[in-house]
Amino acid sequence: MRARLLDAGAWALLALLLAGPMAGLRLQTEGTGLTLVTQWRPLAVIVVLVFVFRLLQQTALPALTRLALPKPRLSGAGLARHPAVLGLLFAVAVIWPFFASRGAIDLATLALIYVMLGLGLNIVVGLAGLLDLGYVAFYAIGAYGFALLAQHAGIGFWLALPICGILAAISGILLGFPVLRLRGDYLAIVTLGFGEIVYLLLNNLDGLTGGPNGIGGIPKPTLFGLEFARRSADGPTFHEFFGLEFSSSHRVIFLYLLALVLVVITLAVIHRLRTMPVGRAWEALREDEIACRALGLNPTSIKLSAFALGATFAGFAGCFFAARQGFISPESFTFIESAIILVIVILGGMGSQAGIVLAAVFMTLLPELAREFDQYRMLLFGLGMVLMMIWRPQGLLPSRRPRLELRQ
Amino acid sequence: MTALLQVDGLSMRFGGLVAVDGVSFEVRLGEILGLIGPNGAGKTTVFNCISGFYRPTAGQVRLDGERLDREPGHRIARRGLVRTFQNIRLFENMTVLENLLVAQHDHLDTRLWSGLLATRRYRQRMRTALDNAVSWLETVDLAELADREAGTLSYGQRRRLEIARCMVQQPRLLLLDEPAAGLNPRETAELDALIVALRDKHGVSVLLIEHDMHLVMGVSDRIVVLDQGRVIAAGRPEQIRRDPAVIKAYLGEA
């Protein structure tokens, strides 16, 4: 640990030397002459970032990259086998908002929220094989969780994010306990009821949730405490800190990038889960519950873990949604949302992560592109689903499981 | 020899139908016990009661003196009593190797953080489970097919995989439900050798339901005969072969 700290310190020092003249000094016109102004803060940020990055690179990253065991290897996991393609896609996703319009970035952020929801529901439906028609309830719990925490306890986005995840997970477990003994259609109906109950509660608990009027004034996420506003009472804002011209697109881009980071984390975590014992247990349970019991797997706890983890990601998505909108009302959490998320999972190909990303983007872009057909949207939507079921029931990009293989 | 499994007055009623009626027998440590009888005699029902898939209407089941008959199936499996199924139940979309890893779920580090961070403990447990899986694949002669999906295996290979999937859990008692059904004579002979090896080399006791008389008479130390839910005879294979009640109910006059 000491050696690592020293090493990271050396990196930070190097960063200080290199970045010092570029970021630490600024030329300023003063009357007729130029003067050098030292700016300490951007420099400090850079040095700290480099230090933390190096430390993480040495400690956390090796742990994260030990994906496969030395001899048996993971394979067949679709895109995950092509790190170059993945890296390129990620780079494009990071860079393009700086050249795009505000509206486009906004839409992309929404698409990313749906990606996160789709990936979360995929755990429950695609991997564990439990049909959940009330998934939007967990999304609502995340969103309202943050709104209420901010309103009553003054808790900011970053602290609220894990809390919302945990809240959603707990509600997943609470719902799961009584209903997971049900199967197939029966489970679907009960979860549908759960979604409706949450919606009705939000609509009618006027005192707590503001009823149909919703909750407004939800704080936006900050970057290490820097707000994205023209000016703020709580210290410097983003543009003041970095000495930039104020622009409202900063926040839009920041929200987009934040959503992107959340999606990437979600993708990585779920990819990993699938190769872990719990992920294999989900798939085994989907295939044959009786065999699982005969092998000593407890079906209830495995289903609960799928429910809870799926709900957690909906909680994160809800928290981010509330922070982005600044205002939430029960109308954002109706059954049709559950249906759209489920369609994303089915359209993408159950269990397939890349498919879900594609389907989520498709499902958010399509209504925008086909604005003229607004009145017929649901009709087209239904027709699309029917055709899909006839010609490509396995989804756009059918799932290829990450398999554990022995290479002799 | 001491009794590993003790079944006492086991009865199972489905509505008006009495499928198993006061069945008692025991499986001794290190023995292969055959359970035979005509179709509908209640053999599989007895299996389902012992392995926790049915809750018996009356009677007791004890493994090493501990009551099993009120426990759910997955906990019975964890106590060291595992079973195969008459119609093989594999995870067909998973590879052969993965089937064996799922079976070792309880021996792995299943905690979320251990897995996400690939802790030392997590990797060690995984390593042990993989080695165990590979060594069993070699024992049942499926090592070459480790990466194939279980659904693509032949019938005989599936049978062997199902047995390996039980054995990776290091059970004390193995319940085999008609393992020779659908096998050709050569495969049956291999199965015969495998079952004997399981007992002799791996120290597991076996309770075997089987219709193939040649196999049952060959490998069993003792045999229990069921007819219409009752035990009609119990004893060594050569006694059973000569027992008039058994001949009448099941074996038929020669």
Image (cartoon, rainbow, N blue to C red):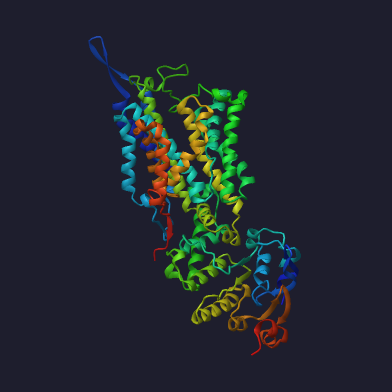
- The answer to whether residue B78 is above or below residue A236 is below
Task: Give the quarter of the image for residue A288.
Answer: bottom right
In the rendered image, the residue lying farthest to the top is A31
Residue drawn at (41%, 36%), measured in percent from left and top? A112
In the rendered image, the residue lying farthest to the left is A32
- The number of callouts visible is 0
- As rendered, which of B71 and A50 lies closer to the eye? B71
Residue drawn at (55%, 52%), measured in percent from left and top? B110
Q: In the rendering, at what x and y percent does residue A77 appear?
A: 39, 53
- As rendered, which of B7 and A33 lies closer to the eye? B7
Q: Is residue B92 left or right of residue B209?
A: left
- The answer to whether residue A273 is above or below residue A113 is below
Task: Give the quarter of the image for residue A21.
Answer: top left
- The answer to whether residue B227 is above or below residue A184 is below
- As rendered, which of A104 and B172 lies closer to the eye? A104
Q: In the rendering, at what x and y percent does residue B125 appear?
A: 52, 58
Q: In the rendering, at what x and y percent does residue B198 appear?
A: 57, 75
- The answer to whether residue B77 is above or below residue B197 is above
In the rendered image, the residue lying farthest to the bottom is B254
Q: In the rendering, at what x and y percent does residue A342 appear?
A: 47, 43
**In the rendered image, which quarter contains the C terminus of chain A?**
bottom left
> Can residue A93 be seen in the rendering of this structure?
yes
Task: Give the quarter of the image for residue A110.
Answer: top left
> Can residue A221 be seen in the rendering of this structure?
no
